[in-house]
Amino acid sequence: MSLQGFEIDGLYIPVPIVQGGMGVGISLSGLASAVANEGGVGVISAAMIGFREPDVSTNYREANIRALRKEIRLAREKTKGVLGVNIMASMTNFDDMVTCSLEEGVDIIISGGGMPRNLPAFASPEHKTKLVPVVSSGRAAELLARIWKTRYDRLPDAFVVEGPLAGGHLGFSMEALDDESVTLENLVDDVLAVAEKLREAHGKKIPVIAAGGIHSHEDIKRMLARGASAVQMGTRFVATHECDADIRFKEAYVAAGKEDITIIKSPLGLPGRALRGSFLEDVAAGKRKPHSCYCHCLASCTVEKAPYCIGLALANAQRGRLKAGFAFCGANAWRIDKIVSVHELMRELTTGE
Ligand SMILES: Cc1cc2nc3c(=O)[nH]c(=O)nc-3n(C[C@H](O)[C@H](O)[C@H](O)COP(=O)(O)O)c2cc1C
């Protein structure tokens, strides 16, 4: 059975699959345009996107704006499909990244990694860009909608609800990650109830997009049957030819077993899910990775307290230097056994074949 398209505030998306934004440098124009060409939403991650610019250490602000603009334009050259940018609310250059995305007219901004309380402040009525927060509970969805409505007279155009099996930073405490009642299914139900209340109160249909641990066509069908309009998937898109990471990053996913996936506490102050390796073993053993900080990329990170520089560690991993960094991954990364094209992956996800 193939899957039905959906709409975000009048924007039609032919295939109900959103590729999750993956930083640092894992989802850039290559992956995002390939997914958009298959009818899904292709998403560029803005996290430290300037890491390859020669002046990033001396001119952090401009280097990141330049790199984001370049990636959006490159993606646009390759696709007429639906293109998004993922911008974490905890980045110190959040405002720059949002402003640049709006100027470039991306279709969607997806924002998690904290609460994007002021995201609508940057958008004016002539911007067609849809604003989509990532939430980890019905409570967060309700609170954010209330803040946006009160302060900006605007509601979210969709919610991504990310459950505990996702890759990267997780919006849950360590205790919640161990709590068996905290499942994506329950969270989807809670956020659907909030979306329904908002529809009754304001007459706006807000689609709910389920994320975290979704691996197969069956998983997608299960979420759609529950009432979600689409899914967001990150991990599976890493093991594609078009993913923007070094081949060694992708091969680490293919090689990983269940026991290789672990939960870390990141300098962002949140738990994160990642692949084990010597870098993380050293950190767990209390060894500090000496670093200086030229950008203060995360609002909650301090160079004195952080045992390593997460921006640098993730950029090293993106380049395939896995001993000098680590790879984030979702709980189902161990199920991946080969690298395929985005076309093949999208066919498998949409048809089950
Ligand atoms: C390598 C990697 C990097 C990620 N980076 C980001 C990011 O920069 N911002 C963000 O909001 N989410 C990030 N995520 C989360 C994804 O966007 C997505 O929501 C999540 O991976 C969904 O779960 P799945 O990987 O099990 O499909 C990342 C995930 C992975 C695997």
Image (spheres, grey):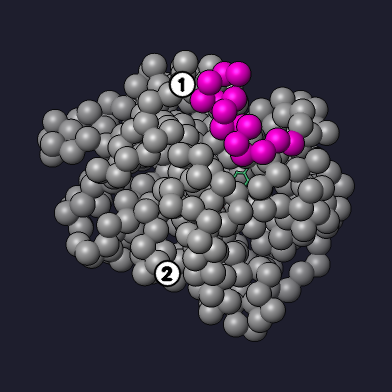
Write the residue at 46% across / 39% down: 39
Q: Which mark lies nearer to you, 2 or 1?
A: 1
Which residue is label 1 attached to?
A: 2
**Quadrant assignment, res 256:** top right
Which dot marks residue 36?
none
Foreground: 294 or 48?
A: 48
* Of callouts 2 and 1, the N-terminal one: 1
Q: In this orientation, which residue lies closer to the viewer: 161 or 147?
A: 161
Q: Amino acid at mark 1?
A: Ser
- In the image, is residue 340 part of the stretch drawn in magenta? yes
Identify the residue at horizontal 70%, vertical 32% (top origin): 333
Viewer can see residue 313: no
**In the image, 59: left or right of 206?**
right
Seen in the picture, residue 153 relative to 165 is either above or below; the reply is: below
Image quadrant of residue 13? top left
Residues under numbered marks 2 and 1 in contact, where contact means CB atoms less than 8 Å apart:
no
Cα–Cα gap, marks 2 and 1 = 36 Å
Given the image, on which type of amino acid does mark 2 rest?
Cys
Q: Residue at x 86, y 53 (%)?
A: 323
Q: State the quadrant of the C terminus.
A: top right
Q: Residue at x 72, y 29 (%)?
A: 336
Left or right: where 342 falls relative to 210: right
The magenta segment: 339-353
Percent across and percent down for residue 199 are 18, 33
Classify the position of ligand 1 by quadrant: top left, top right, bottom left or bottom right: top right
Place of residue 265 in the rendered image (x, y in percent of width and height, measured from the top left): 66, 46
Residue on which disc 2 sits: 100
> Element at badge 1?
loop
